[in-house]
Amino acid sequence: GAPAARDAPPNALVEAALDRARALDARGLDEMLRRGAAVAGAPAFLEETIAPLLVRIGEMWHAGRISIGAEHVASAVIEAFTADVMRSLTAPGAARSVVVATPAGSRHVMGASLVAAAAAAEGWNVIFLGGDLPVAEIARAAAESGARAVALSVVYAADAADLVAQLRLLR
């Protein structure tokens, strides 16, 4: 299999993107991401650059090596970028739909946004609900849309037992 992101050789584009984020250069970061996706193609770019970039930002934030402002700039740019990728690739008439969301209590939608963009790149019709939704609403959206799958993203669960109970209800 592919090596884990932290074991992969340094990606020059990831490092350059981190430099832009640390400089609070949202426009420069956005332009860099869009050029990179145009060259590599969206699916490969999401896997080879955006996912490792998110891992690095998270590691740096936890280690105190990136400011909150820089993390927020990067998050905002990456979220807008992945939303644009998702919209540009989602086929309204696709044979199969996937509902993507985060359950109640999970407001961080970055992982869900990345999953939605990757699903769109694979030909799924993506129904992106965003974050912090009760599982009953996620289930309703899946049933009403005839979705073949539901994808959830959870960054941190303050109450793991409650999350497991919610997931059982959704299932």
Image: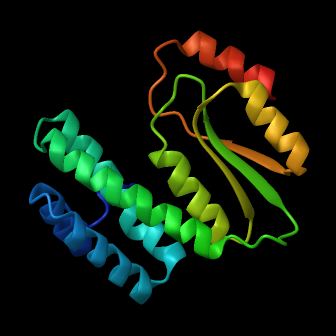
Q: Kindly tell me whether residue 2 is visible in this rendering.
A: no
The residue lying furthest to the bottom in this view is: 39
User: 132 above or below 32?
Assistant: above
User: 169 above or below 34?
Assistant: above
Q: Position of residue 54 (x, y in %)?
A: 34, 52
* Left or right of 106 in this view: 133: right
Q: Position of residue 142 (x, y in %)?
A: 82, 43
Location of residue 101 by image quarter: top right
User: Count of labels shown?
Assistant: 0
Location of residue 30 by image quarter: bottom left
Snapshot colouring: rainbow
The quadrant in which the C terminus is found is top right
Q: Position of residue 71 (x, y in %)?
A: 23, 46
Residue at 65 percent across and 67 percent down: it is: 120
Residue at 55 percent across and 15 percent down: it is: 160
* Left or right of 50 in this view: 60: left
Q: Position of residue 109 (x, y in %)?
A: 49, 43
Q: Kindly tell me whether residue 142 is visible in this rendering.
A: yes
Residue at 53 percent across and 70 percent down: it is: 85
* Left or right of 79 in this view: 11: left
User: 164 above or below 140?
Assistant: above
